[in-house]
Amino acid sequence: MKENCDELCKEVIQRKAEINTIKEDVLSKQKLMLTDKKEMEKLLEKQANLKDELVKILGVPAQLGKETEKMNQKKIDAEKKKEALNDQIEELNGTLKVIEKRTEEILQERENVMKELDGKQILLESKEREYITLTKLLEINREKESAVLSDRAALEENLKKCVLEKKKQHDILIHKQTQKERELRNLKKMELQLNMIYDSLEQDKSQHKRLKSEAEAIPKSNGLLLERRQELQKEIEMTRRSLAEQEIMSDTDAHMLEEYIAEEGRLFKEQEKCRVDLSRLAHLTWLKVEERDQKSRDVQKAQIQLQNIIKEIKRKDLEIREYKKRKRQIQNQ
């Protein structure tokens, strides 16, 4: 359409130049005809004068005849020239009509181009409104993306804290488990020692009974036996004290073992709670990341659509500029 409009403008300019040339030719021909007409009138006037003189001068008929023939010949030539000029004028008028018709067609095409230009202008305004709407939508999506990124940063920070807390609890649990295993080993050793003490105690009891029965069987008056009895009594007393201390130590170890078992259960519960919290936090983080990715994809789609609209607007703007330029050229013509 642009090339057609440029060709039409060039053709209009060329036709106008041809019209101006033809008008100048017509004017020059008309001036020439007026000059010939004046000359002819002068000749006719001269012919009339000569005829008058011919009437008056009857003595020179031959010369008057020659001059009359010359005048008639000039008159004939002038009429032929006038007819030729009339033919040229008719031809120029026909050409002028064709040019005027072509000019009307060009003006009609110009009007059609202006109508199409108005339609393009309306479409451009619609695209500009759509561009403004998409720009606002893009700003909103950017704000949402910023909010999502800040939420993600907070969630990542919380996740790091939970991971560190879990690692700390895990280290504490490992330390307590190690301590518990060490204490269990010590407890097993103490149980073995306690069993050995019980066995020794049973042996001491049996020996005590045996010695007691022997002491009762021996007369009290025997000093050696009495002294031996006292020694055995001291040994029994020491054995009882040792046994009592072992029993107290066994009760303390059992109490500590129960505390260790309760502490282990509590640590396992805390570990399970941390694991559940971490799983929930990871799921929430995944949802936030998925939402952010979706919003990022939406923003990318909006940006691509916006770029396409901007390209379309630039292309339409270029077309409108070309139409306006052609319009100014046509108006100037």
Image (spheres, rainbow, N blue to C red):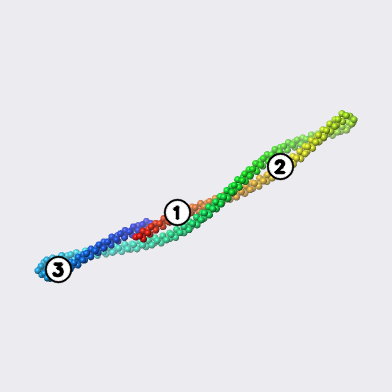
Up/down of 163 relative to 220, above or below: below
Labels 3, 2: front one = 3
Q: Quadrant of residue 193?
A: top right
Residue hosting label 2: 260
Instruction: Please tell me which of labels 3 and 1 falls first in the chain.
Output: 3
Residue hosting label 1: 311
Dots 1, 2 in contact, CB < 8 A? no
Q: How far across and how far down the image is residue 302, in percent?
A: 50, 53
Is residue 290 visible in this depiction of the protein? Answer: no
Q: Left of 309 or right of it: where is 192?
A: right
Q: Which amino acid does label 1 sit on?
A: Lys
Q: Left of 85 or right of it: where is 137?
A: right
Task: Please tell me how crowded label 3 is: few (under 14), some (14-19), or many (20+) other residues with Cα within 10 Å.
Answer: some
Q: Distance between the residues labelled 1 and 2?
A: 74 Å
* Callout 1: SS: helix
Residue 50, label in figure: 3
Along the line of sight, which residue is nearer the eye, 95 or 243?
Answer: 243
Q: Distance between the residues labelled 3 and 1?
A: 88 Å
Along the line of sight, which residue is nearer the eye, 174 or 105?
Answer: 174
Is residue 27 visible in this depiction of the protein? Answer: yes
